[in-house]
């Protein structure tokens, strides 16, 4: 019997805000007491209800204490303070986990109710208070019984529970007498117009009286349940309860409450072992009509009780037949009702026992197969949703499947109508569902089973289930295709569309993805209101994704557009359904692929913030925004370098992408971390850390690296699965190193030595992660580029500090290292990251840049001194690379004499080394740019000997002219040739600019002619990259000659006639 408690309360407001607000309100009310006129009234009852609704019970209790002395509160409310306190304490106890505190709260509530009843005998709330007190006592009794289930002193707790039940019974007995007396004082005859209030009071008292009678009987029944079977007191209590239920039934047999009392009386008879008497009542109730709906609920409950008595009476056939017949009448709105679910499982139990009985008598009894099939079909819905009976329903289905592979009835005649074909197909699908449950549950039973005979039987069940699925799937598709061929104008459209949905599903299961997509899209768009429309759309989308994956060609336009179309339709048609969220997550990668990030973000914002799918979508779009930003920065830098403005700021629109990426990733990570560590979470956290570093917020990146739940460094060190993708661990260590150093430069790093020590650990982590020495060198070079980017993106005011911190770190690492990879990284970083990042806007070497170039030279010289040590060099020919790098660094430093000497030595060993020849020509070109050195453009163009004293016509250094001549027409040297031609023209142009008058014009015209001749010989000019360089140089030349700066366009036009 369910006891009535205080009305259900919804808890929706944020607790921390409401607690503060209400605490403030209590204080405000206290202040008002001092300032408002005495006629003002406190809305106390409404305020109390609001406090309880928002679980602010402590404040509510304090408020009640304060209101006892407040002149603002009506006397009527003051009279109810004990009652209100009792209600509040009961409500508070429902959210208290500490058993001792909960008991104390209920004790206090009980005392408050008693105090109210003792002091307010004639108050209108007296009857309600008695009921609350009775309910409270019953609740406390049940709590004792619950504890008794796991306690050692069961007998004591049960005894205490009985004492509480006894007290509750007395409360309800008193309530009955009081209510009866009040009803007797109301006149029998009342005028509906003049006596409305009395009629309302009479109806309320009658309802309370009926409720009190039912609860009194229920208390006796529950008290009996605390005693063991055979106990004389138990029998006495059940007999008394049955009599009280019977009394209620006799008085109220025409009301639903009377029928329930009748059922509860039968339940008591059942507990007394009087199953025949119980069944006579249960069957009487089962004969009741189905309407109103309350009778349906009564009937299913009665059937559940009746099955117990039929089993006890060995009337299994009747139990099976009666329960199956009732289940066949189940309505769609009843499928989730737990009483109907319970009935399905109880039916399954009795059917299983009856089948065993039939098998014992005749194993070939045709009823066996029919009963198994029917039971499986009726049990299936109980397995679809999580409930207390789900696991048992699955076990029963597995048992009914047994070792019989012929779950689809072969002997049925071929369907002749649409309806027959539809039903046959549905039966085949049910067989698949049943067999699937066997496949899902039986393997675990086989693994646990010790008995060889039972295990062999279970293995046969598995074999049979596999056979059923293989055959039933084919059969179902045949039947549904037949059904579609039998459609007539009279066929219900809803049934036709359900068949289409089933066909869509079966096509998908059979990997007929084109057919599944077509049928699914048809149902979704042409019958969007049908039962299977949403699922059909979902299958159509899934099928299109498979087709996209299976298409191995470069052109996936058709599949892409189809996916986008279906996903967009689902989102717009069912925006509030889970399918819409799934469709958005499917659509987003394709929008990202099309670089429609704003549109993708719009779809993300359509996913509810509470949805678990929102975080995943945010991570995808956030990372796409970050990738777009990085690409944009790279393109911007290349464009600015080409325009000789390398330090130009990043455009605002691009900067906004970085800000947006950070916001979206932050939101996504905060959502996704609740679901645990995943590949997506790690990638997003890494991207966010990189954004923070490049935004000059390295301390925030350090927090991500050391986060307590998804700290990237710990995950990398532990080899967590989420970091297993190639390159992830390397990026974590690289980003962490940049973050630690950056935090020092930004003044947020804490102890300098400790942070540098952590950065060194990241270097060690990198080295241990990348085993291949060549790959490690590449990784270090990549890190150097990232550091260069970090410095370039830093605010000008922080750039110098950041460079100095990095320099300190590099110096310490270089001083301690004797490893080629580490030292090479130190040298490259000093030169390319710190040196180049501190050049003047004109490209001139500043004092800061010179300092870092010098450190790079020193490191390369040290590496060359270690070259003879065994195992230092990763390969023998690396010495040449180091000598080359030393020469280039000296060149960048402006020490051209040393640089030339090193290159000459390399060319003496191998004058055909094209790479060295290119750098030697560039050396002279760079040298010539210095004041009063323009004569060196001649050597850059036409070569030079090893020394100025050597006048040999065969020059060791070729220069751009000979480089172009020797590489012309050779595909492998395409870039070298076009670089040589561009630089040859550049040297002539710059040499001309240094002259005056006719000599200036002559040299600049020769530069122009170089480009014209190259364009005639090679119409593509080596590809887009070189063509752009030729075009820019030609425009500069044309400007110097006072010609229209049309670039290569002027060469493409035919001459004027």
Image: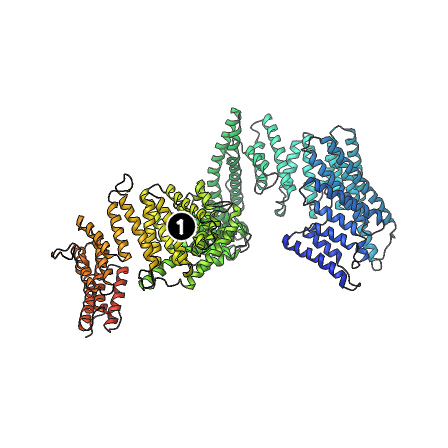
- Foreground: 970 or 944? 944
Q: Residue furthest top?
A: 452
The residue closer to the viewer here, 109 or 498, is: 109
Residue at the spot 21% in from the left edge and 57% down from the top edge: 921
In this picture, residue 194 sits left or right of residue 878: right
Does residue 503 sit above or below 952 in this rendering?
Answer: above
Residue 222 in view here: yes
Q: Position of residue 328 (x, y in %)?
A: 62, 42
Between 745 and 655, the one nearer to me in the picture: 745
Location of residue 401 by image quarter: top right
In this orientation, which residue lies closer to the viewer: 450 or 494?
450
Does 886 appear above or below 404?
Answer: below
Q: Quadrant of the N terminus?
A: top right
Q: Is residue 1005 above or below residue 719?
A: below
Q: Residue furthest bottom?
A: 1057
Q: Position of residue 695 (x, y in %)?
A: 44, 57
Q: Is residue 752 left or right of residue 166?
A: left
Is 816 left, or right, of 462 in this rendering?
A: left
Q: Quadrant of residue 211?
A: top right
Q: Is residue 43 left or right of residue 926?
A: right
Q: Secondary structure at mark 1?
A: helix
Name above or below for residue 285 compared with residue 955: above
Q: At which x and y percent is residue 389?
A: 61, 38
Q: Residues within 10 Å of mark 1 (few under 14, many from 20)?
A: some
Q: Position of residue 593 (x, y in %)?
A: 40, 55
Residue under label 1: 548
């Amino acid at each position: 019997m369910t006891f009535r408690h205080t009305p259900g309360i919804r808890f929706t407001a944020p607790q921390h805000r409401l607690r503060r607000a209400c605490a403030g309100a209590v204080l405000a009310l206290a202040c008002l007491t001092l300032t408002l006129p005495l006629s003002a009234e406190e809305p106390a009852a409404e305020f109390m209800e609001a406090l309880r609704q928002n679980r602010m019970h402590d404040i509510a209790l304090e408020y009640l204490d304060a209101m006892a002395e407040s002149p603002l509160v009506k006397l009527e409310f003051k009279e109810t303070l004990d009652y209100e306190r009792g209600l509040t304490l009961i409500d508070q106890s429902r959210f208290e986990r500490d058993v001792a505190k909960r008991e104390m709260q209920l004790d206090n509530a009980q005392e408050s109710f008693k105090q109210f009843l003792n002091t307010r005998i004639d108050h209108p709330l007296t009857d309600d208070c008695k009921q609350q007190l009775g309910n409270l006592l019953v609740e406390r009794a049940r709590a004792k019984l619950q504890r008794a289930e796991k306690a050692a002193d069961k007998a004591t707790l049960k005894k205490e529970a009985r004492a509480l039940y006894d007290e509750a019974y007395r409360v309800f007995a008193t309530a009955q007498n009081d209510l009866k007396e009040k009803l007797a004082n109301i006149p029998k005859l009342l005028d509906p117009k003049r006596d409305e209030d009395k009629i309302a009071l009479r109806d309320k008292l009658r309802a309370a009286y009926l409720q009190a009678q039912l609860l009194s009987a229920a208390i006796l029944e529950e008290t009996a349940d605390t005693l063991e079977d055979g106990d004389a007191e138990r029998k006495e209590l059940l007999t008394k309860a049955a009599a009280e239920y019977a009394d209620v039934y006799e008085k109220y047999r025409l009301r639903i409450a009377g029928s329930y009392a009748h059922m509860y009386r039968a339940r008591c008879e059942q507990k007394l072992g009087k199953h025949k008497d119980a069944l006579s009542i249960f069957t009487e109730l089962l004969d009741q009509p189905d309407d109103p709906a309350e009778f349906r609920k009564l009937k299913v409950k009665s059937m559940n009780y009746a099955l117990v008595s039929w089993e006890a009476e060995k009337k299994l056939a009747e139990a099976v037949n009666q329960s199956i017949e009732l289940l066949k009448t189940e309505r769609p709105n009843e499928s989730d009702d737990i009483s109907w679910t319970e009935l399905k499982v109880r039916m399954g139990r009795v059917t299983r026992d009856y089948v065993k009985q039939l098998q014992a008598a005749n194993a070939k009894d045709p009823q066996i197969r029919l009963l198994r099939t029917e039971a499986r079909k009726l049990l299936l819905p109980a397995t679809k949703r999580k409930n207390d009976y789900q696991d048992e329903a699955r076990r029963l289905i597995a048992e009914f499947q047994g070792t019989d592979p012929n779950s689809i009835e072969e002997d049925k005649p071929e369907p002749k109508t649409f309806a027959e074909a539809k039903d046959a197909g549905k039966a085949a699908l049910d067989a698949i569902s049943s067999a699937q449950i066997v496949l899902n549950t039986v393997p675990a039973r086989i693994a646990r089973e010790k008995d060889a005979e039972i295990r062999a039987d279970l293995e046969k069940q598995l074999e049979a289930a596999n056979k059923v699925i293989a055959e039933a799937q084919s059969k179902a598709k045949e039947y549904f295709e037949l059904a579609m061929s039998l459609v007539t104008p009279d066929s219900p459209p809803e049934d036709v569309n359900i068949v289409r949905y089933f066909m869509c599903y079966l096509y998908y299961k059979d990997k007929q993805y084109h057919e599944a997509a077509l049928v699914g899209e048809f149902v979704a768009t042409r019958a969007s209101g049908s039962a299977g429309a949403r699922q059909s759309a979902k299958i159509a989308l899934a099928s299109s994704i498979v087709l996209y994956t299976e298409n191995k060609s470069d052109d996936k336009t058709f599949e892409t557009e189809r996916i986008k179309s279906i996903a967009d339709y689902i989102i717009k048609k069912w925006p509030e359904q889970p399918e819409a969220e799934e469709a958005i997550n499917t659509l987003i990668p394709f929008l990202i692929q099309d670089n429609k990030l704003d549109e993708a973000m719009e779809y993300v914002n359509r996913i509810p913030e509470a949805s678990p799918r929102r975080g995943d979508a945010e991570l995808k779009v956030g990372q796409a925004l970050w990738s777009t930003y990085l690409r944009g920065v790279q393109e911007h830098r290349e464009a600015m370098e080409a325009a000789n403005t390398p330090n130009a700021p990043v455009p605002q629109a691009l900067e906004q992408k970085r800000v947006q990426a950070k916001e979206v990733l932050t939101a996504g990570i905060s959502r996704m971390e609740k679901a645990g560590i995943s590949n997506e979470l790690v990638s997003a956290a890494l991207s966010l850390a990189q954004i923070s570093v490049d935004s000059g917020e390295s301390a925030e990146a350090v927090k991500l690296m050391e986060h307590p739940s998804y700290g990237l460094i710990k995950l990398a060190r532990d080899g967590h699965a989420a970091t297993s993708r190639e390159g992830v661990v390397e990026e974590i260590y690289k980003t962490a190193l940049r973050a630690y150093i950056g935090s020092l430069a930004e003044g947020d790093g804490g102890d300098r030595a400790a942070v540098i020590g952590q950065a060194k650990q990241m270097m060690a982590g990198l080295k241990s992660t990348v085993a291949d020495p060549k790959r490690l060198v590449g990784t270090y070079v990549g890190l150097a580029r990232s550091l260069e980017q970090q410095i370039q993106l830093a605010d000008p005011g922080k750039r110098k500090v950041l460079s100095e911190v990095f320099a300190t770190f590099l110096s310490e690492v270089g001083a301690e290292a004797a490893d080629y990879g580490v030292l090479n990284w130190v040298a490259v970083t000093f030169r390319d990251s710190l040196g180049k990042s501190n050049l003047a806007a004109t490209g001139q070497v500043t004092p800061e840049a010179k300092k870092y170039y010098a450190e790079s030279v020193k490191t390369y010289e040290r590496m060359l001194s270690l070259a003879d040590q065994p195992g230092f060099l990763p390969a023998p020919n690396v010495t040449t690379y180091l000598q080359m790098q030393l020469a280039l660094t000296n060149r960048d430093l402006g020490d051209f004499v040393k640089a030339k000497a090193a290159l000459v030595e390399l060319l003496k060993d191998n004058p055909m080394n094209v790479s060295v020849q290119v750098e030697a020509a560039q050396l002279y070109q760079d040298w010539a740019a210095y004041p009063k050195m323009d004569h060196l453009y001649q050597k850059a163009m036409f070569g030079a000997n090893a020394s100025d004293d050597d006048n040999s016509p065969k020059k060791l250094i070729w220069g751009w002219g000979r480089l172009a001549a020797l590489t012309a027409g050779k595909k492998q040297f395409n870039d070298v040739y076009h670089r040589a031609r561009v630089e040859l023209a550049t040297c002539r142009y710059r040499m001309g600019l240094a002259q005056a008058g006719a000599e200036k014009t002559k040299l600049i015209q020769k530069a122009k002619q170089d480009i014209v001749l190259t364009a005639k010989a090679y119409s593509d000019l080596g590809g887009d990259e070189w063509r752009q360089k030729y075009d820019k140089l030609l425009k500069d030349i044309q400007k110097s000659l006072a010609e229209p700066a049309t670039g290569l366009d002027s060469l493409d036009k035919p001459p004027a006639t």
